[in-house]
Image (tube, helix red, strand yellow):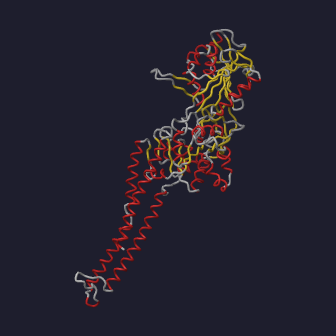
Amino acid sequence: MLVFLKTGDQVPADGLFLRGHSLRVDESSMTGESEHVEVNGGQNPFLFSGTKVVDGHGEFLVASVGMNSTWGEMMSLISRDTSDQQTPLQARLSKLTPLMAKIGLGVAFIVFVVLLARYFTGNTKNKSEFGKFEGSKTKIGDTMNAVVDMVAVAVIVVVIAIPEGFPLAVTLTLAYSMKKMMADQALVRRLSACETMGRATVICTDKTGTLTLNEMKVTKFWLGQESVEDDVGYSSISHYRLDLIREGVAFNTTGSVYRPSSGSGFEFSGGPTEKAILSWATLELHMDMEELKKQCVIQHVEVFNSHKKRSGVLMGRKANNTTHVHWKGAAEMILEICSSYYDASGVMKNLNDDERLKFEEIIQGMAASSLRCIAFAHKQVQDKHINDEKKYEKLEESSSILLDEKLEESSLILLGLVGLKDPCRPGVREAVEACQLAGVQVKMITGDNVFTAKAIASECGILQPDQEAKEVVVEGVEFRSYTSEQRMQKVDGIHVMARSSPFDKLLMVQCLKQKGNVVAVTGDGTNDAPALKEADIGLSMGIQGTEVAKESSDIVILDDNFATLVTVLRWGRGVYANIQKFVQFQLTINVATLWSTL
């Protein structure tokens, strides 16, 4: 079956891309990563059910539907009933209670036999110091009463020996802790999760939206080979260069800027990268998108594609009838088509081999700091199509005009570089360190590439500088290809798993549980739901978390703060310690009573 997709459609089944144009999908429901993915007939021809088309159109061949699709398989894992699984403490108490009952029955039997023997041998005395049993002289009714008294004593011993207060004490402790945890921004959906958290030995966490804010931001801006750090640096940029950068951002984008009539602030639409750049240009460069649209007109747009890794626009200025080409894309790809650049003082310089090498070092440095590096380039071109204002009006009246020749891709001027980053949540590093000090290992499982995963893990404190990355960082496909024995051998040493699928996370959780670990999993996306369900304790995010993730979790972190996990861990250990104290108290009473009975 062939299915046609356009912007806004939800992919109904798994399949293979056949044909189309600029098809980009949001796979966050599957991978948890918010960056849109381009689907084409080359490197990435796969479409998954449940994902959404955000740009372009295309046609694909349906390969699997229903429970056979990726989405269906994930839902089947979530729907498995795990309600009969006991927590570690419940498992221990369930063994302790029968054991105490057996001991109590044994002691009661011994007591009953001893009392019976003493009675019938005449060693049981009455108040007159005569034996209660005198053979045929003793009435049958007196003998029956004596035996009943012995049975009553044995029953009392059994009742004392069985710790019937365990369930009530555990329930009261968990209910009290649940109320207190609610005040600390942790909603407990399953009562036993309170004490399970206290036993956690491993935490498997997602990256996007859990360790990070899931909000791309421009954190670096390079003019030439100098970094612009503050408002003073922005104010020193010449108006001409600022206008070029503003135009490159405003017209070469798939996003938009909207300011409500209430004036409450700007609202940005588009992909995460587009929104971050538009926000930066609007707030830092004071770009007025509406005003720019009035002053200029777009003549041709070349959309982003995964081969060139850049997008371009040809636009004309109405004021002076000049035409300009603007390119934006991956910094290394833009650098290849530039022959000059503006330095920090605004002087245009030739981009020779030495200068090009310096820019490559800047780009590599940003990549090592987990920054996504985007470059802007510009060139004023000869306008063969527009030479008067009337033709501008014709351009504005038409919905789109595509010129015969392609946009200029040589001898461009590099305007600047920006570094974008999804920053870590405040307090995450301290929370990770607190978990490690408490003996809880933190593992990060993400769909991002290895370089980004390593950089974020190092920033959060999951990876230490002295650790060998080859041993502790793996990709999902590599972990999946291991044999069962290899996985069990290596799973404890893996700290970061990159390029992972939901089933890779689920597989890791299963391996950790088989090795005797008590596993907690944090996540906020639908892709995290199978692992949240499988884990001993699942923790979802209350603000950005999907409903599927919340329903699959045991505890909901209401403020989406990973640091709240440390508070949950403290409460869990407090619950466990209190229950232990009560068990010790109860057993002391039982043993002392049994001993005194003997």
* Position of residue 221 measured from the top left corner of the image (x, y, whole percent): 62, 24
The residue sitting at the bottom extreme is: 136
Q: Give the quadrant of residue 377.
A: top right
Tell me what residue is drawn at x 72 percent, y 17 percent.
349
Tell me what residue is drawn at x 43 percent, y 65 percent.
97
Q: Give the quadrant of residue 120.
A: bottom left
Relative depth, front residue between 422 and 303? 422
Relative depth, front residue between 395 and 372? 372
Look at the image and tell me in which quarter the N terminus lies: top right
* Position of residue 232 measured from the top left corner of the image (x, y, whole percent): 57, 18
Q: Would residue 506 be visible to someone looking at this image? A: yes
Total numbered circles: 0
Classify 472 as above or below 329.
below
* Position of residue 439 measured from the top left corner of the image (x, y, whole percent): 53, 49
Classify 112 as above or below 546.
below
The residue sitting at the right extreme is: 353
The residue sitting at the left extreme is: 128
Look at the image and tell me in which quarter the C terminus lies: bottom left
User: Is residue 101 rendered to the left or right of residue 441?
Assistant: left
Q: Would residue 300 be visible to someone looking at this image? A: no
* Position of residue 355 measured from the top left corner of the image (x, y, whole percent): 73, 23
Classify 89 as above or below 274.
below
Relative depth, front residue between 41 and 235? 235
